[in-house]
Amino acid sequence: MSEEFDPYALLAEGRVSVLATIKSDGRPQLSPVTPFYDRAEGVIYVSMTDGRAKTKNLRNDPRATLEVTSADGRSWATAEGEATLVGPGAGPDSPEVNALVDYYRSAAGEHPDWDEYRSVMVTDRRVLMKMTVDHVYGQRLG
């Protein structure tokens, strides 16, 4: 008997995903991203640069979709929801940069140089996307 497919588990495992946002003309804009899914909160977090297409799109229309494909390509999961953007931070100790530090710790663990990380987050004008997941679906093939 095969075990039941859990798209939420695949969302939590996914490291490289595709984020779809909506352009001003209504067409989708797709970007590869590295998400972190907090299953307990039902929120997907992604660090991104302010001013890029996906951040501009989310500021205009917060609806977003994230797709994760398993490493073997035989399963996929899609999460839909609305996103909010936190940041960019004005300084390395700002609440916005602290949110990016929390994201990094959750997604990747400890950074070897937090001062450098904080400085880069400010210089690069990084923002944190927080997408509240309201619908998940997916499939295991074969």
Image: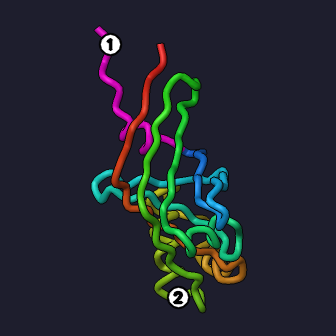
The amino acid type, in three-letter code, at marker 1 is Ser
| Nearer to us in this view, 89 or 50 | 50
The amino acid type, in three-letter code, at marker 2 is Asp
**In this view, which residue lies farthest toward the bottom?**
90
Question: Looking at the image, which residue is at 57% across and 86% down?
Answer: 89
- Would residue 125 be found to the left or right of residue 130 on screen? right
| Nearer to us in this view, 68 or 121 | 68
Residue 73 magenta-highlighted: no
| Nearer to us in this view, 25 or 125 | 25
Question: Looking at the image, which residue is at 64% across and 73% down?
Answer: 56
Question: Looking at the image, which residue is at 58% across and 65% down?
Answer: 47
Lower position in the chain sequence, tag 1 or tag 2: 1
Task: In the rendered structure, find residue 2 and report the number of the disc placed on it.
Answer: 1
Question: Looking at the image, which residue is at 46% across and 85% down?
Answer: 95
Percent x, y of residue 132:
38, 61
Task: In the rendered structure, find residue 93 and report the number of the disc placed on it.
Answer: 2
Magenta part of the chain: 1-14
